[in-house]
Amino acid sequence: MDMLILVPKTTNRLHYIFDLILKDLLGISFKFTTDNETFMSYNGPKMHYGNNKFWDEPFQKATNILFEHDITEKELKIVDYKDVKAFFPVFNDKSMFPFDLFAASFYLVTRFEEYLPHINDKHNRFQAKDSILFKMNMLEKPIVNIWAKHLGAKLKEFYPDLQLKKKSFTFVPTYDVDAAWAYKNKGIFRSTAAFARDIMNMDFSECQKRWDVIIGREKDPFDTFDYQLQLQKELNLHPNYFILCGEYDFNDKNISLRNTNFQNLIKRIGDYANVGIHPSYSSYLNKEKVGAEISKLSKVLNREITMSRQHFLRLNMPLSYQILIDLDITDDYTMGYATLPGFRAGIADTFRFYDLEHDNVTNLNIHPFAVMDGTMRDYLELNIEESYKKASDLIREVRNVDGTFILLWHNETLSDEKRWVGWKSLYRRIIDTALNP
């Protein structure tokens, strides 16, 4: 039997967040009513989301955000609740929670704060340090999942026979292929320029290494795809790959898609894994460029491209997602920060993109990742053991809420050379931890 929820009025925002919290996370089917008499006479499970408690039903005091349509600054007063923090406090001792769980969850998963005035970093990205979760010191907790679990427990107190969804922890490895090879297949001009640079820097060991790889005496250090395939077969992994297909530029340095060796590599990857587009740095907010890159990758694989992750994680709300939707992308994996690990949208589960600008839910599925190799190595400057602890702590947080742990890695990180020495074994340790409770 559906749970009946009494509300002052229904809105798209209200439908969206109740669908996510009750149906998707808790497995509770529901319907809304605005009629008091209908609510009072209902014999099944019910809940009141509004201003004042009337009867003995579960009651959650509401704030205004879910009944509005505009995008304006909100006062985000932080409050403590059990093992976590929250915001949008409510002052009603009859409320199930001392904060508006639904409004706070909506604010996080829609990335409401990213629509508001803010200062981007040098790559035009919203900065993690400006987020409410960072200010609450809750960025590394899937707080929406945690709140939902608390809600489920509260509702079970009222309705012991209420059946909640049985979720399970899931691990999804993903790879960004920014540079398929370090030395090979770069073409005569790029290779000649690289040799000249090595000589000018008097880096003769690098020059020799480059030559040995080009003539086939050594394997290219970034060519770690055999190892990835070995892991997939051994551990029954189902990774997603994101291929950079943009033309060569300062921040887009992959091999040209006109190169037959690169095409063959992509086809090989596509034989054993899901492949999506990695829209180039220079295609940022350029629908025509993104579309052209998707088209090129689609022709190589001879299949439709429906997955995406932005290069450099350059995400602009809502334009980046609006472009992807227009280009028939159904699943995006960009939701995370480059500078810090954790849960940008406060959630460790797939959710649909809600377009605040148009005030409607879309069919674009957002898959938030928890941590990236470059975040630990380059931004936080963690060593191997510190990186393992960070990743394993995040895995534990996701496992505690039976969520999905998505790991972002690069093929070059598995080279075990230069600045990535030790990271190949670290990667295996992280995977083993994710697969073995």
Image (spheres, rainbow, N blue to C red):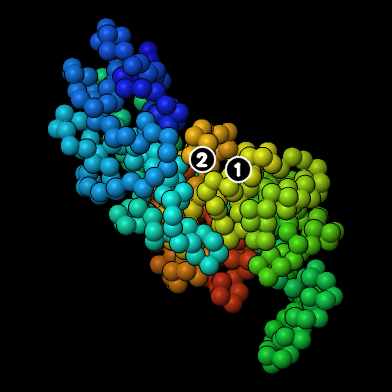
Instruction: Give the x, y percent position of residue 411.
Output: 64, 62
In the image, residue 321 above or below residue 122:
above
Residue depicted at 27% across the width and 22% down the height: 48
As drawn, 312 above or below 50:
below
Q: Nearer the viewer, residue 215 or 285?
A: 285
Residue type, mark 2 in image: Glu
Mark 2: give few (<14), some (14-19) or many (20+) Cα within 10 Å: few
Secondary structure of the residue carrying tag 2 is loop
Q: Could you tell me which residue is drawn at 55 percent across and 53 percent down?
A: 315
Question: Is residue 63 visible to the viewer in this orientation of the structure?
Answer: yes
Earlier-in-chain disc, 2 versus 1: 1
Q: Is residue 207 above or below residue 297?
A: below
Label 1 sits on residue? 322
Q: CA distance from mark 2 to mark 1?
A: 10 Å
Considering every residue shown, the one lying at the far left of the view is 93
Q: Residues within 10 Å of mark 1 (few under 14, many from 20)?
A: some
Q: Which residue in the structure is indicated by mark 2?
A: 357
Kindly tell me whether residue 145 is visible in this rendering: no
Query: Between 91 and 413, which is closer to the camera in this rendering?
Result: 91
Residue 105 x/y as whole percent = 37, 39
Query: Does 216 sit left or right of 115 as displayed?
Result: right
Q: Position of residue 106 (x, y in %)?
A: 39, 38
Query: Could you say which quadrant of the image residue 420 lies in?
Result: bottom right
Residue 201 vs 305, above or below: the answer is below
- Considering the numbered disc 1 on the image, is that residue within a helix, a strand or a loop? helix
Placement of the N terminus among the 4 image quadrants: top left
Q: Are marks 2 and 1 in contact (CB under 8 Å)?
A: yes
Quarter of the view holding residue 95? top left
